[in-house]
Image: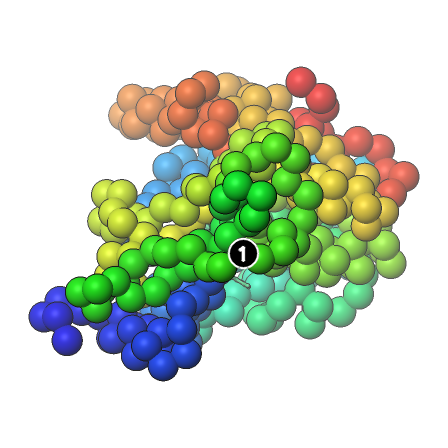
Amino acid sequence: MKQDETALESALKAQISHDGPLSVAAFMAACLFDPEHGYYATGAGLGRDFTTSPEISQVFGELVGLWAAHEWHMIGAPDPFHLIEIGPGRGLLMEDVLRATEGYRDFRAAAEVTLVETSPVLRRMQAERLGAKAAFMNGLSEIAAGPTLLIANEFLDCLPARQFIRDGVHWRERMVGLGHDGALSFGLSGPVPLPLEAGDAGEVEVQFGLDAVVSEVSARLSGAPGRALFIDYGPPDTTPGDSLRAFCRGEQVSPLERPGACDLTVDVDFSRLKRLGVAAGLDVHGPVPQGLFLQRLGAEARMQALVRANPGRAADIHAGVQRLVEPGGMGTAFQAICLSSPGLPPPAGLEPI
Ligand code: SAH
């Protein structure tokens, strides 16, 4: 065993030498969700290895909160309704949502807040931040049926992805195996049937977990009115090729480095998400670039109000909001998309560009 080898790395090497190479999705699933050593299961690097929008500026969660309060009226002001977040990380987004909507008494009185989180360590972190305001579930399907507003930021990007590469007339799958030196290394499978349409792409990456997410969302939203807002990064209208990236302490590293100790992430295929939503009978609005979405919701006015209340922090507040909306940066790398029960009025901020 290498000196700095992680426990998960040793386990994966043993597994591969016994059973053969793993798909990129199986490798990613082990690195992120292995119950003992997975990155999210242990929660070790959250807040250290990457920074999410709610961590950059409170304005992000506040605007999402105001969006939710507005959309509650658009879905008929149901009382009670489920306010659900999937993948809450450290719990900052829901904290900002709840703080920003304190004055919207009817909305808040009607809201039953549920956090969908699989990691026990992260659940503890979220419970400390939110106290008794939220219930916890392992999956969306465990939450009782009923009207719903669902939010998820940087959740879809951690759904494991398989990668396929065109090789002449065949397709091959990228696998994680062992190199001659016994280290983890990428390789290609023998020819495999391609499980989806690829057009003339030379390489495609597919998150099959998106199908399950959309079918759970559509099961909820077809029985009662509701909306699901997803914000994540990825191209608005093309299928990613190889976007697998790893982050450790703010640095991008090789995806094979220190399994379980680094965050692994892929681009979300918003075009496919949209197709899946429409095929499931939902109305889909967006994707719209995050910067435009936040500006349409009033990022500028919210920022000015914050600056007036905290003049000593004006530069920081400006810089944070600027980072969230900047074209060429997070403002265009991230997209917002909304899946709604059919027949509702269009949601705020997601009008076509
Ligand atoms: N939303 C947070 C960061 C998300 S990090 C923010 O904006 O700061 C990804 C989160 O999704 C983590 O909380 C992780 O534990 C959770 N997660 C990943 N897969 C999940 C799944 N299948 N079900 C529920 N939660 C999941």
Figure quadrant of residue 209:
bottom right
Name the residue: 74% across, 58% down. 215
Q: Position of residue 24 (x, y in %)?
A: 44, 58
Kindly state the secondary structure of the residue where label 1 is placed.
Answer: strand
Figure quadrant of residue 353:
top right
314 left or right of 146 in image: left
Q: Amino acid at mark 1?
A: Pro
* 229 over 285 or under it: above or below: below
Report the front residue among 227 and 173.
173
Q: Position of residue 42 (x, y in %)?
A: 34, 69
Name the residue: 23% across, 43% down. 251
251 left or right of 17 in image: left
Report the front residue among 54 and 142.
142
**Crowdedness near tag 1: few (<14), some (14–19) or many (≥20) residues, C-alpha within 10 Å:** some
Question: Where, quadrant-wise, is the N terminus in this rendering?
Answer: bottom left
Count up the numbered dots.
Answer: 1
Q: Position of residue 85 (x, y in %)?
A: 59, 55
Residue at the outermost left position:
3
* 120 over 96 or under it: above or below: below
Residue with the mark numbered 1: 191
Q: Position of residue 141 (x, y in %)?
A: 70, 68
Is there any visible trace of residue 304 in the rendered image? no
* 262 over 1 or under it: above or below: above
